[in-house]
Amino acid sequence: MQKAKEYDWKDSNLALFGSDTEKKVKKDAAETEPAWQGSGQEVGLEVWRINKFKVERVPKDEHGTFFSGDSYILLNTYIEEDNPDKLLYDVHFWIGKYSTQDEYGTAAYKTVELDTFHDDKPVQHREVMGHESRLFKGYFDDMRLMKGGYDTGFKRVLPENLPKRLFQIVRDDATRKTICKEIPMKQGNLNDCDVFIIDNGLEGLYQYNGKDSNMNEKYKAAAEVQKIESERSGKVSGTVIDGHSIGDGHPALKYFKQGKSKEKTAPVKGPPMMFKVSDEDGSLDAEEILNGSLNKELLNSKDVFIIDDGEEVFVWVGAEASVDERKNSMAYAHAHLKKTEDPFKPIHVVAEGKESKSFNAIWG
């Protein structure tokens, strides 16, 4: 079986999102997609994943679990207190680290289709595994980032063939929530600051508490251990071990591989920047208009603007922007990120007059 190629924005076809493809996605075509029928009718979150170019609904009890080999589409339907009779939408496509070009290209295409199905009302977002926006992470009380693909993750396996896995419990300061992330089973990946779950199948289930870890991480890990115990019908019980008391011969480390963990550096927050995408002079281009600051007064209805606040990118589409400006704006946002030290930042597309709370918050 051919190994899936690791996601790399540089060779992706994500320009489908907001490009010429958008012209080809008509309302009648969107209405022929069975997955969209009945979507967005009531407040709540709906999740689909891409499987061989097809859109498959993810059951509610699996919301928040994402596999690195897959791509997903999410639709969040909500209301605001001052207008409870009007449904509002956010639509995201999420790209796994090892998702194939076919999968994330289809996810991008189908996201445009879902937006069209709902008459262009949703705010559109791109999310990359491990670089999710605050809005995206805020949807879930429990979020799991798993290795492999959806099929391999949820198919039933014999007890003796249960995979051996290591999970790291990480607190996200922005959302004040914790994420359970599967990482390679190497002893060098354990540290004093976090909590880990060592899952040796039916041979042992351990909660490893780093000596400097906090109570939120320990509580989240305990909940995950209980979930795994339930999934295995009580055939294995979790054991709590302290980081300082574990030695090389401990049974928890039986399946650990040799090797040091890879050095991970936090994304570098770049300076805030603004670009104007315009064809007013007869040729379409993206011009940098601010570097080091943001100014909302520079927005005008005739053009499209790319706003990078250092953490996330917004594509603001003016009400009178031309067709070329609209359809190429996402491609220009990708081109900008390609030149930065963090090309996987979330991208949000907002239309003039339909700005989101997160967009309004960046101006201070």
Image: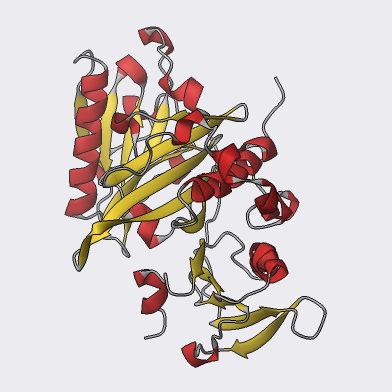
Q: Residue at x 53, y 82 (%)?
A: 272
Residue at image point 34% right, 37% down: 63
Relative to the observer, which residue lies in front, 4 or 248? 4
Residue 297 lies, with reference to residue 306, above or below; the image says: below
Q: To which quarter of the image does residue 329 belong?
A: bottom right
Residue 54, x across and y down, in percent: 57, 28
Examine the image and state in which quarter residue 308 appears: bottom right
Position of 273 compared to 183: left or right?
A: right
Visible residue check, residue 338: no
Q: Nearer the viewer, residue 119 or 70?
A: 119
The spot of residue 209 in percent (x, y) is 25, 44
Q: Give me the residue at 45% from left, 24% from top.
A: 153
- Look at the image and tell me in which quarter the C terminus lies: bottom left
User: Residue 252, position in %: x, y?
Assistant: 33, 28
Residue at the right extreme?
Answer: 282
**Is 142 placed above or below 266 here?**
above
How many dots with numbers?
Answer: 0
Q: Is residue 303 above or below residue 121?
A: below
Q: Is 14 on the left or on the right of 158, as rendered?
A: right
Q: The N terminus is located in which quarter?
A: top right
Please name the colour scheme applied to the rendered image.
secondary structure
Asked if residue 321 can be seen in this view, the reply is: yes
| x 43%, y 74%: residue | 353
> Which x, y percent locates residue 280?
74, 84
31 to 360, vertically: above or below:
above
**Residue 190, quarter of the rendered image:** top left
